[in-house]
Structure formats: structure tokens, C-alpha cells
Image: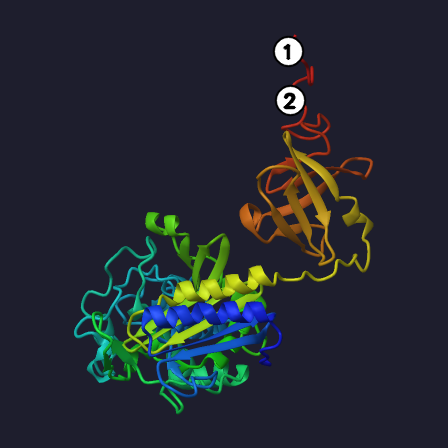
Amino acid sequence: MTSSQEVLLPGTRRALLHRIAVAQAEGRAPSLVAAVVRNGQTVWHGARTSVDGHGPDGTVQYRIGSLTKIFTAVLVMRLRDEGALDLGDPLERHLPGTGVGEATIAELLAHTAGLAAESPGPWWERTPGALRPELSDVLGDQPLLHPVGRRFHYSNPGYTVLGALVEEARGASWEKVLRDEVLEPLGLHRTSAQPRAPHAGGWAVHPWADALLPEPLEDLGRMAPAGQLWSTTGDLARFAAFLARGDDRVLSAESVREMRTPAAPTESADVMDGATYGLGMQIQRHDGRLLVGHSGSLPGFLANLTLSVEDDVAAVVLANCTSGPLLGAVGADLVRIVAEAEPRIPEPWRPLREVDPAVLELAGQWYWGTHAFALRATADGLLVLAPLSGGGRRARFRPNGDGTWTGVEGYYAGEPLRSVRGADGTVNHLDLGSFVFTRQPYDPAAPVPGGVDAEGWRGIG
């Protein structure tokens, strides 16, 4: 990945700098550093600091807290893709004796396993991990607070369990597996479990005075898979590009897309906020834009990674304070500034390389009852079904190679689409998961709902 300040327009760069300057000043952060990624490339880096002289650059480490969870989720998805486990497997099948074995791996990834939010005992983020040497110490005597699979309840111990699952499957430490399977292949050489110079120091800022208190840097021990990592804007920019596109050396584009897909039941407050959770990734709707990524915090540090797949823009924001600037809002604003000031230029339209007469025969206008739809064959080899006007069910379909198709999104995800031909060999109707689509509304030549009244269409008089 390259880095260039000249890719964005001067006005865009100034707007980005203004946004982080306001965040650092109003949030009273000792330092704040940010990067923007567009089209898989780092196109802007900015920093603000309270220290005179050179501000932090893209190689300075900050602690990233719960952003670590995305990395742990990637390791679990790798195990799934290799066939070592299924996301629907109960944990007990692969990691017995935890006391939470009835929860599935997917439920742990999506924070729906019913586990407590925090580990029992002293505040785990501000005390040595040596106080919790075993998984049982992290989970406690009553690890489940809610019925398994019924509600979203964010759980740090849940990701500790997933880290232990990775260690059990690989026969190596979580840290080593992460380095060998994710960090090194993606070139994230400045991401590590322990701080490496140059790195920022963590500070608490007095709420009622412009005064600082150094925060302790604790090793989280068993809790590491939930929040241990240190990283830089440079590395996290590369990681954001990976989360948008995938990388077959680590995880396919399809699997990272699955991580970005909602997987948790949403509570009423979350519906109002437009927020939910995928497999290791936070998902929210902000100012009409769908954003994915994760926030992170540990005493002395705040972190945020925000990605808009539709705009192909991502932002990373890091600060070295316990509280202050709302980095999620800052990250969303950085994405918005670039997306609105310099909208994504679409790829040129290109026709199909080859035209299949059987597919072309399906294209055109169809009716489900009296609802009008259009079916289009697109250059990427898919069929797209969409209502001709107003709202309605829209979906894309991939070919199965035998003349049938399968929905890949929305209401028709996984549903079969096939064409049904009459005695003369022409297409009579489409069968979409038992729904009949015809060339005319309620076509009497097609199965029910067509031809249900012998007198056909009529007026009132």
C-alpha cells in the first residue's frame, strides 16, 4: 500500500485536518493521529499533538483495545474456511470443559452467547493478567447472564474463549498464530501484543482541569484476544483495505463480507441507533451511510476503524487518552468528508463478454401477481431482479451451472430460481422459491395464481 498526500484535493485534505484538530482540541487528547484509505490505498495521514515539535506519524504505536477482536475473529474464520470447525458447532465440541460449551462459535463471535460483559474480580483492564491465569478465572462461577443465542450482549470474556479456541486448534499461543497467519502475510509489521518503540504513552486527562495522569500499561494475559494489541495508523490502514477486499493469503473476500454481515439480534435501542454486530465487526448506519469496523479503548488509549464499503473509503483514528474525543464520530466524519467531497468514480460500464441465449431469454419484465419487476443479466454473470417502481424485494442471483440460480442477498438469499418451460420449449414462467413470476399479470397460462377466474380482467360496471 502506498501513501500520498497528493491523491486528495487540497480542500479535502484541509477539511480532514480541521476535523481531527477540533477533535484533539475539544477532546483534550495529548495526541491524536488519523489516516484515510480510499480504493485500497492510504491517501491521507494527519496528526495533532500537545507536545511541541514533530507530531506522531503512521509508524507510532498506540494501544487499540477491542479493535483486537477483529483480528481474533479473522483467526476463527480461517479455521472455519479450512474445515477445522463450523460456525454452528457448539464450543464444547472443540474446547470442552469451559462451562459455556452450549454456545456456538458464531454466537461467541457475535456476542450472543449470553456471557457476562466483563471478567469477575478486579477491573481486568487496569490489573495484571497474572490475576487471571486460567480460562476459569476469566469466566468465573456464573459466566452466563442471559439465555444462549437470545440477545446481543457485548462480552470481553467471550473473545477470550475464542482466543483459547484458536490456541487449542493450532497448538500454539494466540499471539504466535496471529503473527504467523495474519500480521506477517498482510505486512502489519508494526502491530504487536507488546509495545515497540516508537509508541505513545497512555494518559488520563483530569475531567475538570487540564492536567494529566499516566495510566499503567498492563499485560492482559488470558484476556489478550479481547484487547491486547498495539498498532499504528499505517498498519491499520492496510488492515482496513483487507477488511474491504479480503486477501486469499489470509481470508477470502467472501469470508470478510460474511464478517461484515449482521449476525446479532438487535434490541430496540439499537434499532433506533441503527447499530448491530456481525462476526467480530460493529455495524452502524450513520448519516445514511452503512459503516463497519470497530472501536477500542483501554486505560490511556482510544481507537477506531471505520469503513464504508459502498464508498470504498475507510478511516483510522487513534488517541492516547482514557476518555475525551469520540473517535467513532470522528472516523465517520472522515469517511463522509472524503466520500462527499470526492465521490467514488464508478468503473466504466462494460457489456457481457458472451451472450447466452438461454439467459437473454429470461431478461425483461416479469410480474409477481400484479407487482412489476425487471430481470437483468449483468456483465458480472449475475441476474438482478428489482421492482420497476417503488420499494420491493430486490436481489441478485448467481448461476449454479445447471440452468438454475440461487439468490445471494435479501429476502431471496439462498432461494432457488428456475425457469419453467412449456410444451413448445419457451419459458412459461419463473419459479422463485415457489413464487410464480409471469410475463403478464396473473397470466392464465401459468400455474396459480394465474387463471383463477374464468372471466378474466373486467371493469366495475
Q: Which of labels 1 and 2 is toward the front?
A: 1
Q: CA distance from mark 1 to mark 2?
A: 18 Å
**Amino acid type, residue under disc 1 in the picture:** Ile
Q: Is residue 80 visible?
A: no
For the C terminus, the image quarter is top right
Query: Could you tell me which residue is drawn at 27 percent across and 76 percent down?
Result: 299
Pick the front one: 235 or 378: 235
Q: Is residue 107 left or right of residue 388?
A: left
Query: Element under label 1?
Result: loop
Pick the front one: 438 or 64: 64
Image spot of residue 408 (x, y percent): 59, 54
**Amino acid type, residue under disc 2 in the picture:** Val
In the rendering, which numbered label is found on residue 460? 1
Image spot of residue 61 (x, y percent): 40, 84
In the rendering, which numbered label is found on residue 452? 2
Report crowding for label 2: few under 14, some 14 to 19, many 20 or more residues within 10 A (C-alpha). few
Image spot of residue 64 (x, y percent): 38, 76
Q: Is residue 90 left or right of residue 2?
A: left
Report crowding for label 1: few under 14, some 14 to 19, many 20 or more residues within 10 A (C-alpha). few
